[in-house]
Image: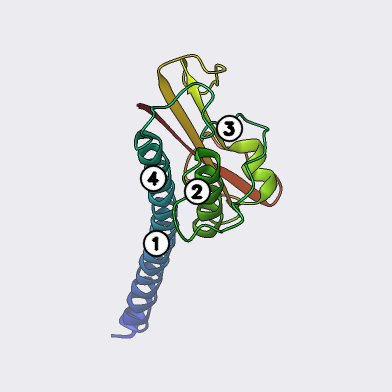
């Protein structure tokens, strides 16, 4: 009987260690799930915003000429918001684009004027990822937003010391 002393204590400690490892694993999975959910919510918002702009472009009664006010090249500024504000839909395409940019800033995290200028574009294109000065039958829209480093689930994004810029790009035939 003396040789069995403490045997149940060792079994209990091993069980406690195994249960603790399992609980830590579940916590890690839950944390990752929350990150993926947040990224999905942001990408869904970006897709919805891009779709809103495409539908505004399609709704133009005169069609969409190559010099439309809807187009914005990378590095260019967005047009100024109309003096009357954005409570009703402006008639002018460039004013609609300005109101759309205001909506983007309100919905997506970390969208600044600098990010709007550098990483956003709306242009005609023949090749994905490039703007071709009014040529091409497709319209490409790129939207970007900033999150904390490591929170963008797209592995192609570049990280700096503190943040990551996530991008969403859509091509559409009008």
Lower sequence index among marks 4 and 3? 4
Say which element carries label 1. helix
Rendered view: 35 above or below 24: above
Mark 1 Cα-neighbour bin, 10 Å: few <14, some 14–19, many ≥20: few
Lower sequence index among marks 3 and 2? 3
Marks 4/2: CA–CA distance: 8 Å
Label 3 close to label 2 by CB (< 8 Å): no
On screen, residue 61 versus residue 110, left or right, reads left
Label 4 close to label 3 by CB (< 8 Å): no
Marks 4/3: CA–CA distance: 16 Å
Relative depth, front residue between 83 and 114: 83
Per the image, the residue denoted by label 3 is 72
Percent position of residue 116, x then y: 62, 43
Lower sequence index among marks 4 and 2? 4
Quadrant into which the C terminus falls:
top left
Per the image, the residue denoted by label 4 is 52
Residue 117 location, quadrant: top right
Say which element carries label 2. helix
Mark 4 Cα-neighbour bin, 10 Å: few <14, some 14–19, many ≥20: few
Relative depth, front residue between 51 and 143: 51
Per the image, the residue denoted by label 2 is 100
Say which element carries label 3. loop
Relative depth, front residue between 61 and 51: 61
Mark 2 Cα-neighbour bin, 10 Å: few <14, some 14–19, many ≥20: many
Marks 4/1: CA–CA distance: 41 Å
Lower sequence index among marks 3 and 1? 1
Per the image, the residue denoted by label 1 is 25
Label 4 close to label 2 by CB (< 8 Å): yes
Say which element carries label 4. helix
Relative depth, front residue between 89 and 73: 89
């Amino acid at each position: 009987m003396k040789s069995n002393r403490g045997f149940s204590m060792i079994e209990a400690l091993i069980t406690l260690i195994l249960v603790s490892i399992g609980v830590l694993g579940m916590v890690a999975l839950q944390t990752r799930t929350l990150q993926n959910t947040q990224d999905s919510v942001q990408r869904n918002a970006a897709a919805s915003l891009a779709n809103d702009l495409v539908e505004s472009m399609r709704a133009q009664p005169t069609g969409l000429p190559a010099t439309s006010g809807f187009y914005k090249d990378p590095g260019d500024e967005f047009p100024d918001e109309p003096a009357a504000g954005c409570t009703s839909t402006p008639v002018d395409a460039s004013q609609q684009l300005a109101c759309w940019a205001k909506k983007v800033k309100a919905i997506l995290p970390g969208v600044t004027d600098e990010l709007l200028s550098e990483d956003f574009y709306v242009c005609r294109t023949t090749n994905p990822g490039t703007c071709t000065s009014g040529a091409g039958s497709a319209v490409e829209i790129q939207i970007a937003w900033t999150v904390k480093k490591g929170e963008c689930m797209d592995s192609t994004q570049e990280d700096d010391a503190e943040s990551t810029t996530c991008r969403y790009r859509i091509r559409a035939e009008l």
